[in-house]
Amino acid sequence: PTLGWEQEYFLIDSALAATRPDIIATGRTLLGHTSSKGQQLDDHYFGSIPTRVLQYMRELEYECMLLGIPVKTRHNEVAPGQFELAPIFEETNLAVDHNSLLMDVMEKVAERHDFKVLFHEKPFKGVNGSGKHNNWSLATDTGINLLSPGKTPMSNLMFLTFFINTIKAVHDYEELLRASIASASNDHRLGANEAPPAIISVFIGQQLTKVLAELEGVTKGKLSPEEKTDLKLNVVGKLPDVLLDNTDRNRTSPFAFTGNKFEFRAVGSTANCAVSMTTLNSIVAKQLIDFKKEVDVLIETKDLKKDEAIFNTLREYIKGTKAILFEGDGYSDAWEKEAKKRGLSNHKTTPEALKAKVSKKAFDLFAELGVMNHIEVESRYEIELEEYTKKIQIEGRVLGDIARNHVIPTAIKYQNTLIENVKGLKDIFEKDFTKIAKEQIELIKEISAHIEGINRNIDEMIEERKKANNLDNTEKMAAAYCNKVKPYFEVIREHCDKLELLVDNGIWPLTKYRELFFIK
């Protein structure tokens, strides 16, 4: 297995980051009103790399060279302050190690340039989040890419074998694949406007869809000499030598074929690639073992030649995996309904998604391949649930602290200024006071309503946290934090963000989005 990861990240000024307790403690902004200018114009994406960032990137690339990390690509991403780098493809174990090392180096180099690196999947509301697209393929020990269409029908038969078996593996284990990318931070990204949905599907493009449809129409059983010729020349032989990302048109797909590899786009930017790659490698390995057995049985019992047995097996796989193939808009409501009809899972939260890791299907898979035993799988499940709970718990505490210690006192301070203003207006304009001070009085009332909303919801959130902490097992606690505690975050944030627009900018205690976004 080979891997080429793409690491997306945000850079913000370290001095500004230090003014935000939420960024320091959680890696993301728990509140903050959307900036008037964000990514609407695509001017950051298509613009040149800011000079200060380019200096950072150059030093980072130098440090990577010293460590043997083969980084090659650097560019701006869609959101303001967002960037990406990617390496030359490597053997998966090495690529995973290099990515983990890189993230550490990125933070250290950033400090020297007065930057703070944000790896969180959704650090800012209202603009794109960050992923870590895992470009995965299989190669021989001599470097031949098994997912690259070849020049002859025979080499394309090899390509189709690995291509269709990968699709079959994803079809059979889509829930486990979804579980491999589950985390508290990635929950913010999956299903948002720039990210794949929580539904796992495979995008292969029109050309390969047509090839599979023709292959599906091949007669079952022994092939006549004419059928063999027709199949190899007109179906298998049609594939061009290199598709060169001919199918890379659907950015809403979580698992897309992009010419000579599959791109697992749903992996989060904070993730360790090892988790998703272990799962993907395992399900494909299991599928290839089963495929070999099925082909051998056909050769032995049906007296079929090897190619005929392969074609027959692949044909049945194509028929049985149509549910996982999807070419349309993965963000649409219509796809959610269609996916449900097809029987695909749609686990939108981590506690829900992680259950697939401790299913009998998962236990059997990892045990059969000698990857992990039951205890090792259960341990990882327990740890991931606990990590999820603690992250939500920390975010809830930080949000409550900021709202009560920063936002509310500032709002009251500004409200007092307004009250003094109203008193002064009353002294000067006794008769017309009500009319002249109308806007100020409404503003005072509006601020009071938001303060009350913040306090009430924080109190309710704390009560739900206490209940969750008293639960007797990790599963129940994670579910409680997910379904009972986390929903308060958006409500509290909404009140705080409204106050940000009402309160005097000169006394607002938190650096705003418009100040964090645009690096000069």
Image (cartoon, helix red, strand yellow):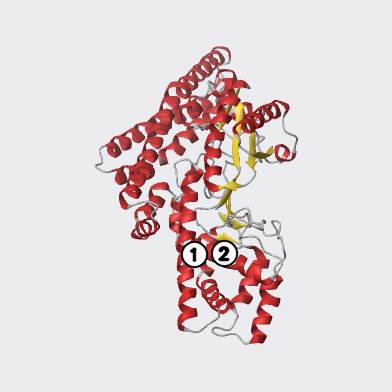
Quarter of the image with the C terminus in it: top right
Tell whether label 1 touches label 2 (CB within 8 Å).
yes
User: Gap between marks 2 and 1, in whole Å?
Assistant: 8 Å
Q: Helix, strand, or loop for circle 2?
A: helix
Above or below, 74 against 2 in this view is above
Q: Residue 479, labelled with which disc?
A: none
Q: Helix, strand, or loop for circle 1?
A: helix
Q: Residue 288, labelled with which disc?
A: 1
For badge 1, the amino acid type reads Leu
Image quadrant in which you'd find residue 467: top left
**Counting residues from the N terminus, which is met first, the one under dot 2 or under dot 1?**
2
Q: How many marks?
A: 2
Measuring 55% from the left and 83% from the top, which residue is drawn there?
220
Res. 194 in view: no
Q: Residue furthest front?
A: 142
Q: Residue 162, labelled with which disc?
A: 2
Front residue of 410/35: it is 35
Left or right side of 49 for 204: left
Measuring 38% from the left and 48% from the top, which residue is drawn there?
351
Front residue of 363/359: it is 363
